Structure formats: C-alpha cells, structure tokens
Image: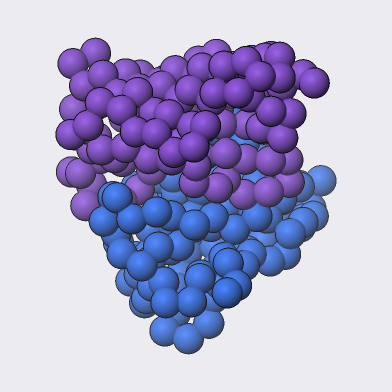
Chain colours: A blue, B purple
C-alpha cells in the first residue's frame, strides 16, 4: 500500500529557472493539498485540488506559482522564475474527501534549494 | 484570525516524564484539531485528532485536551520515550472553507533525554 509519493526528494535550481514538483496521491485518493514549510516554521497551506480542478488556491502566491492535477498522472506544483525566497520544503498531502475530519496523508516532501 | 499559536517552541523532557504542548486559536469556525508528528527528513504523520464536541481524547500514551470556551487545546505525551523526539505540530481546519485545508501551528521540537 504505497503512501503519498513525491519526487524529486531534492531539487536544486538557479535563480530564474523553473521548478516542477510532482505528487502521486495514495491509491483511491482524489483530493490533493500542497503545503510549504520554511525553515523553523510550520506548514503553510498553498492549494487544494481535485482531479482536473483547482478548488482553493488562497495560499498560492499570485505570480510564478501554479498547480494542476490532471485526469491521468500526478499533481504538479510549478514555480517559474524561481527566487532565493522559494527555498523551502514542499509537502503534498492526499485524502479521499475534503471532509475536515478526513485524515490528510503527507508525502516526505521535496526540498527545493535555489542557488 | 486564521492563526494557530503553538508553544513552547522547544521542549526537553526526561525519559518517563510528561511532555505537554499547547495551542490556541481565534477562529470559532475551526472544528477539527489534529496533531502531527514529524521526524527529520520526513513528512508529517497524523498522531491524534479531536473534534470540539469532546473535551479529551486518548490514544495510548497520547492525549488531547480541548477547552472550547478558552479556544485552547493541548497534547500530553505520557511516559515520554527517546523515540518520541520529533517536531510536533498542532493544526486546525475551518468548516467555512469547505476544503479541509489545515492551518498549522509553528511547531514544537521535543527532545526526550534517556
């Protein structure tokens, strides 16, 4: 029973490049959440998606960031023209529904470093 | 109003002692309060969760105490073990968002000394 899979685990980019982070939810889960964790801080909600739909992107920066969850394949968090401040751990979580009481299962994250 | 405030930032406890971590919130729309445990290099893992209709929930050595009127909740780890050394996050989920998104506290780094 595979858990939430994120790749790559570590990603290094130079300023101005693009970063693509992938998340495969647990089997049977069609709801995906992305969170960002800055050093020494808690996780901050970024975006919530269901298959082919963005439901809540209230935590996403207005520029350079986008997310998708296509009908087939993993969810993708895309950061264009990365800057030093984008350095963080990005976590994906999945659940079978959006019920607040439904546990969200987290992947082990992608550590993004910007040179 | 969307914040969850967590304290202490770090905690050192002797093996066998009780670890207590506290959280406070402002938004009365929050109705689900989970605690997550995170080891270095890993993602958060759900430890225990509570709804506001009960004041306490216990699972093994872990207990959540919930005070709805004070808008506070806490995690108690009984008989703390070195293997419990990790970062703990409280969180809350607002019903009004209808998305299940979690609002996390800042985290508490727990060290249990042998």
Residue A95 is situated, as x and y percent measured from the top left of the image, at 40, 63
Total numbered circles: 0
Would residue A67 appear left or right of B73 to someone viewing this image?
right
For the point 32% across and 18% down, the residue is: B72
A94 relative to B101, above or below:
below
Residue B7 is situated, as x and y percent measured from the top left of the image, at 50, 15
Residue B101 is situated, as x and y percent measured from the top left of the image, at 35, 48
- Classify residue A97 by image quadrant: bottom left
Asked whether residue B71 is in view, the answer is no
A58 relative to A2, above or below:
above
A12 relative to B20, above or below:
below
Asked whether residue A10 is in view, the answer is yes
**Furthest residue toward bottom:** A72
Front in this rendered view, residue A52 or B38: B38
A63 relative to A2, above or below:
above
Front in this rendered view, residue B67 or A23: B67
Front in this rendered view, residue A71 or B39: B39
Position of the C terminus of chain B, as image quadrant, is top right
Residue A87 is situated, as x and y percent measured from the top left of the image, at 69, 43
For the point 77% across and 19% down, the residue is: B113
- Classify residue B24 by image quadrant: top left
For the point 42% across and 84% down, the residue is: A71
Would residue B66 appear left or right of A71 to someone viewing this image?
left
For the point 33% across and 55% down, the residue is: A102
Position of the N terminus of chain B, as image quadrant, is top left
């Amino acid at each position: 029973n595979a858990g939430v899979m994120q790749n790559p685990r570590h990603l290094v980019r130079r300023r101005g490049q693009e970063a693509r982070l992938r998340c495969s939810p647990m089997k049977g889960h069609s709801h995906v959440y992305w969170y960002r964790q800055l050093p020494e801080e808690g996780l901050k909600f970024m975006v919530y998606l269901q298959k082919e739909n963005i439901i809540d992107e209230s935590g996403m920066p207005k520029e350079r960031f986008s997310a998708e969850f296509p009908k087939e394949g993993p969810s993708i968090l895309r950061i264009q023209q990365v800057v030093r401040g984008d350095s963080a751990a990005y976590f994906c979580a999945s659940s079978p529904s959006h019920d607040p009481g439904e546990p969200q299962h987290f992947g082990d994250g992608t550590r993004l470093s910007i040179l | 109003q969307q914040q969850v405030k967590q304290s202490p930032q770090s905690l050192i406890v002797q093996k066998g002692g009780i670890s207590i971590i506290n959280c406070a919130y402002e938004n009365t729309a929050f109705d689900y309060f989970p605690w997550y445990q995170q080891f270095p290099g890993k993602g958060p893992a759900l430890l225990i969760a509570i709804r506001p209709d009960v004041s306490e929930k216990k699972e093994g050595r872990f207990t959540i105490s919930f005070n709805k009127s004070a808008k506070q909740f806490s995690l108690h780890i009984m008989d703390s073990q070195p293997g419990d050394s990790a970062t703990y996050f409280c969180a809350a989920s607002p019903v009004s968002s209808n998305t299940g998104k979690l609002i996390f506290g800042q985290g508490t780094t727990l060290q249990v000394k042998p």
